[in-house]
Image (cartoon, helix red, strand yellow):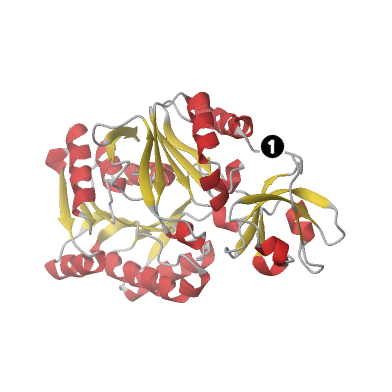
Amino acid sequence: MSYPTVRLRPKAEARAIRHGFPWVYADELVTDRRTQALSPGALAVLEDAERRAMGLVTVNPASKIIARMLDRDPDATIDEGWFATRLSRALALRARLFDGPFYRLIHAEADGLPGVVIDRFGDAAVIQPNAAWAESHLPALEAALVSVTGVTTVIKNGAGRARSLEGLPEEIVVLRGGLQGPVPVPMNGATYMADLTGGQKTGLFYDQRPNHAFGARLARGASVLDVFTHVGGFALAALAGGAGRALGVDASGPALALAEAGAAAGGMADRFATRQGDAFEVLEALGAEGARFDLVICDPPAFAPSKPALEAGLRAYERLARLAAPLVAPGGFLGLCSCSHAADLSAFRNACARGIGRGGRRGQLIHTGFAGPDHPVLPQLAESGYLKALFFRLDG
């Protein structure tokens, strides 16, 4: 195929791109009228300032990330076969890691499909095409997904901040097959109920799987408070690991209903309770009530989704730790999580430590967790390693 060309500015960091960085920012590219006329998601050959081809990119003149590297071969053809090659490679890793077909199959740039997320739920899969190029190539991607994995239901979840940054509309569409209600997902000995068409993101957060497992190790015989529990999160894993009782807190009534359904499916309903409300307000109320738990875990949404939000986000993480720490029984454990890529591990850890201190407690950091291996990290792209989970043992 014959592709148009786009070119880096003379002072752009071509070396980083050659070494694997997958993005070109708008101020790094020559944006003449020809480049600006390219439609969002168009394919082009990226050249350095000396007009040497660097690879095939997708271009969106309306985005701050104006180009994303698709293939180091500038002559690559982006068709069903191209998608199938990448999906097969991703599937081979997940099949080695997990006994059942419940995992993140594609983690965007780290799996060679920039801006694309695919979560698998048995015979169903949810695609998040968060970049314009993926939206325009969705039929080929869907066909390859079905061919490679054998899934019979495919859902497009076109919602979220990333799509708005790409100028894409929000919509949720069943592309193939259908569903009869939430999908039961076995994980860490518990059963989670995932709403693939009406829930948050793709319906379930697979990234916390190893951190759920670590929390469960601390929960044997314990009382557990799981704040921002979503569909059961840490609470159900803790109960499956032998916790005596667990309280799940979330602002979403539908999410808590799914958590309760998961507890019932796992035979744990008698040990699980829920409380709907704003997390900060519930934490303050529990403190006023004198409540204490052996294990408290807070897994909030991203408080710092971008660099401009970093300072406010760190203050929110500190406040969360300050309110949660007094609820931990003497010698108990506090787990604090962040999915904000803008807040690196050091900044997040410092905010948590300040909050714990301001809450009148001291403790040891006993474990630092990250996303599971079905969420691989592209070493050149810090944003792909977004999840942090810190576990503290607090003093008396």
Q: Position of residue 121 (x, y in %)?
A: 38, 33
Q: Is residue 276 above or below residue 265?
A: below
Q: Is residue 129 above or below residue 122?
A: below
Q: Position of residue 161 (x, y in %)?
A: 44, 60
Toward which corner of the image does residue 358 lie, by quadrant?
bottom left
Q: Residue at x 41, y 42 (%)?
A: 156
Asked whether 33 or 247 is in front, the reply is 33
Q: Residue at x 12, y 40 (%)?
A: 270
Q: Residue at x 36, y 42 (%)?
A: 173
Could you tell me which quadrant the C terminus lies in?
bottom left
Asked whether, in this view, residue 212 is left or right of residue 342, the answer is: left
**Residue tagged 1:** 77
Q: Residue at x 23, y 42 (%)?
A: 243
Q: Position of residue 1 (x, y in %)?
A: 74, 39
Toward which corner of the image does residue 93 lie, by quadrant?
top right
Asked whether, in this view, residue 190 is left or right of residue 303, the answer is: left
Q: Is residue 243 above or below residue 327?
A: above
Residue 12 visible in the shown view? yes
Asked whether, in this view, residue 134 is left or right of residue 178, the answer is: right
Q: Is residue 359 above or below residue 36?
A: below
Asked whether 284 or 29 is in front, the reply is 29
Asked whether 113 or 35 is in front, the reply is 35
- Secondary element under disc 1, as helix, strand or loop, is loop
Asked whether, in this view, residue 52 is left or right of residue 117, the answer is: right
Q: Position of residue 389 (x, y in %)?
A: 43, 55
Residue 361 visible in the shown view? no
